[in-house]
Structures are given as C-alpha cells and as structure tokens.
Amino acid sequence: MAHVPLTPLGNPRTTALDDASYRRHASAMAEKNETLRGLRDEVAKGWGEKYIERVHQKSKLTARERIEALRDQDTPIREVGTFVNHGVQFGKLKCPAAGVVTAFCRIAGRWTMVIANDNTVASGSWWPKTPEKIERAQEMALRLSIPVVYLVDCSGLFLPEQSRSFPGLTGAGHIFKKNAELSAKGVPQIAGVFGDCIAGGGYMPIISDRVVMTEQAYMVIAGAALIKGAKSQKLSSLDIGGPEVHVHQSGCADMRVPDDDTALIAIRREVEKLGSSAIDYYRYGADPASPFFDTRELDGLFPPDHRMTYAAEDVIARLVDRSLFWELLPDRGREMIVGVGRVGGLYMGFVANRQGLIDDASERGSQKPAGILYREGIAKVAAFSRACNDDGIPICWLQDISGFDIGVEAERQGLLGYGSSLIYTNSTNTVPMFTVLLRKASGAGYYAMAGLPYEPVVQLSTPLTRQSVMEGRTLSIAAFNTKLDDDFEILSTDPEERAEIEKGMAETEARIEGDMDPYKSASQMDTDEIVQTSELRGWLEVFAEAAYQSSGTRRIKNPRIWSLHDLAALTEVRG
C-alpha cells in the first residue's frame, strides 16, 4: 500500500538565520505590519463614528457587527478585498473597502462566504469596484462550493458614479448572473435583508434559497421617491416592498423577523440545516497539528531587501503540520520545490521558488541564480500541478520569482513551449489553487506560478510584495535606452539635457515603484488581500478546510492511489 512519506523539513530559527539579521528583518517587518493594522482599522470604521452611531440610532447593527454575531466563537473572520478602492477619491468622498465587506466566516461549523453591504458608507450603495468585489467573493464560494450568506442593506447604485459601476462585463448586473451560477451548481445561498434594498440591491437576494426580512427591511425595484416622481403616488418604501408585501403577498421572502439579532439567529439556523462538513472525513484519521517551528518567526525570516535570499524550505516548515513534508523530484529542477504537506490535518500541495544560487547541471562546477524558471523546473512544476489536479489535492503557490530564464540557450531549449505547457495545465486545473505572493511577482513568472490572471481561488500578498514586469530602475533604463551608452550612462554632454534625462528617469522609476506597492495592487483588485507573513498559516488553514468541506463536488482520491506515487516511483534515484 502506498503511503505519503512525510519527513521533517526546515531548520530552527537560530540555524536558519543569525540573531542580528533576524532582529533587523523583524524590525523592518514590524513597521510594515503596524501600517497594515492601522489601515485595516481605518477601513473597518467605514465613514466613521458618526455614521456608525446613525446605524445604531435606527436599532440596527453595522455590517461588521452582523458578521461578528454570525461567526462561531473562537474562529477567525478572514476578510478579502479589504483595500479595494484604497487611496481613491470620488470627488471629496472615499469609499473604504468599496462599501462592502466580503469574508470567509465559519457559521455552525461550516465555512461560508459572507457578503455584507457596509451600511455606514452611503447606506451600503454600490460604487465603482463594488460589483467586481461582490462577484469575486461569489466566485470564491462557487469554486469551493461553500455556502454564501448575503447581509443586504443596500440603497442601490451610488448614482453620481453610475457610469463606472452599471455597464460592462463585470458591472452590477453580473452579480445576479453569479447568483444564478451558484444556484445552478447547488451552492446554498441565504440572504438576510436588513434595510434599504433598492433596484440591484432588491434583485440580489431573490435567487437565494432562503430570504429573511426584518421589520425595517424592504425590497423594491424603485423606491418611494422615484415612484412619487414618476406616478405621483405618496407611499413609503415599506408600503411598496416591506415584509408585509414580500413575506405574506408576493412570496419573494420566506421569513419575517423583528430585528437584526433575530435575523442573524434565523440565518445561523438555516446554515445548521445544511449537510455537515466533510473536513474530518478527508483528514484520513490524522489530527490537526501546528508546525513544529513557530509560524510567527516568518516575520523575521524574510529579508526586506528583495535582492537578499532566504531558505524556502524554512518557510514551508512554518506552514505545514509538524513541519513534515514530502518533496517530490528533489534532484530535478532544483530552482523549484514541489511537494505535499498537511495543513490542519488536510493534504495540500506546495510549489515554491528556491532563492540564492543552485548548481548548474549544464556546466560542471558552476552555479546559477534561483528565483527564476528554467526548463527542468518548469517541466517539474507542470507535472506536479497535473498530478495534484488528478488526485484532487489543493495547491498553494508560494511566489518569490523574478521571471523566466532568457537568452539564446533558453530559446534553443524551447522554454516558450515548456512555459505554455505549464500555463495550459494551470488554466485547465479544476482543483482549488491558492497563490501567495511572498515578495517578488515579476514578469511571466508571475503568470506561470498561478498568478491572479490564472484564476486561483484566492491570491494573497504580504507587505513585502512587489508585482511588476520589471523593477523601476530597470524600466527607466529601458524607457531612456536610446539616450544611454552600453554602461547605462547618459550620452549627452549638455548639462540641461542631462538634467532633463536624469529627471525623467527618476520620475519613471518613482512612478513604477509606486505602482508596485501592494496597497496599489489591492486597491485595483490585482490581489485579493494583504496579510502579515505570520498570518499565512491561519489563512492556509481556512483555505484547506474550505477546499475539503463539501463532499461530492469534486474528485478527491484516496492517498493510496495518488498519481503522485507513480511520479515518484518513475523518477526515484536508484543506487
């Protein structure tokens, strides 16, 4: 009988890194983590205490208070899309988190995706990026087959910006298509309606399997103000589409409750009726266990300077149960690590970029830089990705990559073809994939390592992450190449022209460096969330459990018959 040969991985912190370097790295990371926590706190306040108080004066809860009341005690809320619209101004207004909270939340022992309109931000209306953020959360739930809970308190589109959120492929109407796709796949959807629910906000809960309305809630295609203007009728929105109408007359809602607290209890009871979680079943008798090495040490293991290296094995060792790991094909494509470990007792595949220098098999005694994809490493990763997909093992991609190998020899070896094979594999995989951008996410390497364009279920960044085709300095040199010599020095001897070129190169470099900031990426939805490196293990636990929670929705093979065993047997080194 084949078994999974998990063996110890990684080094103690004192062996992995000297004390002075560790303290220096940890100090730099602590500053970045403090910034991250401060920005999270700022987003969580919505439009501020005054607007929170307005919600409370109506005897209602805020979006985050509702999620807090729903979650199982002593379980985390893993918010995604926290920084969507970060730093963006709409006239004099801001729209923190795009006016909607989306989060993985465990309710009655089951991981769910909660989507809650932030009723402290323009009455929960939809701004530019709000529809895309909701749709992204719906897609996560669809891919994992986990229930969706909508906490609806939405006054419709934020009309001054309607042209940027109403039309287009991912405009507000696409939310309802996602509702339908979730329903078609049999993914449970439960909606609580807590207040304003106008136009698109009115459509959002209707396809849900259960709809709960409070006495303050109403669902209408058009609100009272619009009807008064169009038809000269004096009605309140509650008269038009309150619970009296939709629970007792139209049948568009299922349950009428007095207030927020009662609605949340009703939603929990509906989740409790769903099939129980399959997580324990897929642990195959194993118990969840923490890594042998402290996960918090990750904050000091990563050098803040992207040119400095670390041991990728020491990172994986602080993410997997008991720091045990099965590395496959360890002697081939050494720039890459592929293998399997457990996270919370559940099997997960890992792909990581080694850092530093590795032996160059093409030239005896020579070395070449890792953090780059070469032919053999690409082939190894593609084979591993295909095998994990065949076996039903979720994959975690740990990116710290500078790109593909380049040059005459790389082209002669057919890297374009090998890279295309890997891209095809990752594009057609049906197994859940999760991507973590540890530091560098550069060029086509970012694509090949299951970057966001290849639709991982979730992509995380850290405060150290830099997404780009190339670094700012390199790009400024490329942009001004015709004005530079072979040593990248300015050709002109005219002082004014030299000063103009120097200024242009500096401005280009600064702009590109700003574009590489992880908060810029998160604002544009080029990554799903920014997390501390010390938080990564907790996030992976959620990913693993959510990936295995639903039974019968995807192929999950018994570990005895994994394709990975065949791959290992055919490539093992013989004495």
Image: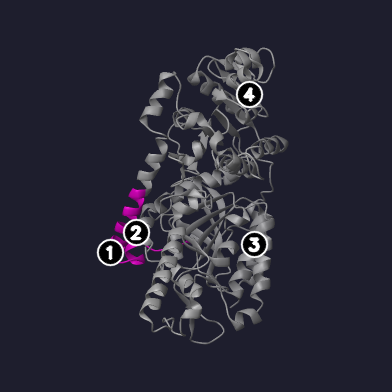
Distance in Å between CA atoms under marks 1 and 2: 10 Å
Amino acid type for the residue under numbered disc 1: Asp
Relative image position of residue 410 (x, y in whole percent): 61, 79
Residue where numbered disc 4 is placed: 222
Graded by Cα atoms within 10 Å as few (under 14), some (14 to 19) or many (20 or more), the crowding at tag 3 reads: some
Q: Earlier in the sequence, mark 4 or mark 3?
A: 4
Element class at badge 3: helix
- In primary-sequence order, the first of circles 2 and 3 is 2
Comes first in the chain, label 1 or label 2: 1
Residue contact at pointers 3 and 1, CB within 8 angstroms: no
Which comes sooner in the sequence, label 4 or label 1? 1
The secondary structure type at the circle numbered 4 is: loop
For mark 1, give the secondary structure: helix
Q: Is residue 549 left or right of residue 519?
A: right
- Main secondary structure of the magenta stretch: helix
Please name the residue that numbered disc 3 is placed on: 565
